[in-house]
Image: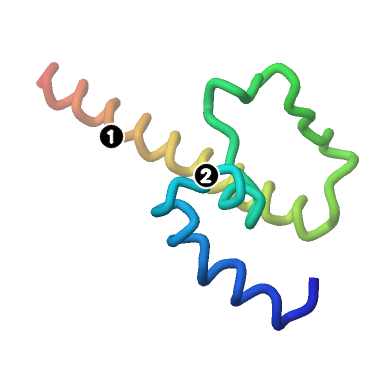
Amino acid sequence: MCESEAPFKTQHAFWLLRWGNIDRAAMIGPTIPLPSEIDAAKIIRPAYDELSDDQRKTFEAMKDQRIEQIEELRKKKEKELLDEIQ
C-alpha cells in the first residue's frame, strides 16, 4: 500500500460504517480482538535470559522500585502497630 492510498481508506471508513458496509470497513484496518477471544494461557512470555539489555535494565529498575515500595509499606505498618501498642 502506498502512502497515497492510506488517507483514502481511513478517510472513508466512517462512511462505510455509516452506510452499513461493515465488511468493507473491517478490511480497512486491523481489528482489535475482544477480551473473550484472547486466551491468557497461550501468551508466551519471554524468560529473563531472552530479554535485551535495555529490557533487563528496565525490569531491574521496576523490581527495585517495587521492593522499595514494599519496604516503605512494611515500615509504615510497623510504625502504626508500635503507636497502637504505646
- 76 or 66, nearer to the observer: 66
Q: Is residue 16 above or below residue 47?
A: below
For the C terminus, give its image quadrant: top left
Q: The residue tagged with tag 1: helix, strand or loop?
A: helix
Q: Which amino acid, mark 1? A: Lys
- 70 or 8, nearer to the observer: 8
Q: Which residue does the numbered mark 1 point to in the structure image?
A: 76
Looking at the rendered structure, the number of numbered marks drawn on it comes to: 2
**Which of the 4 image quarters holds residue 50?**
top right
Front disc: 2 or 1: 2
Q: Is residue 66 above or below residue 42?
A: below
Q: Which residue does the numbered mark 2 point to in the structure image?
A: 22
Most distant residue in the bottom direction: 4
Residue 76, position as x, y percentages in the image? 28, 34
Q: How is the image coloured?
A: rainbow
Q: Which amino acid, mark 2? A: Ile
User: Along the horizontal axis of the image, is 30 left or right of 12?
Assistant: right
Q: The residue tagged with tag 2: helix, strand or loop?
A: helix
Residue at 60% in and 47% down: 26
Residue 68, position as x, y percentages in the image? 48, 43
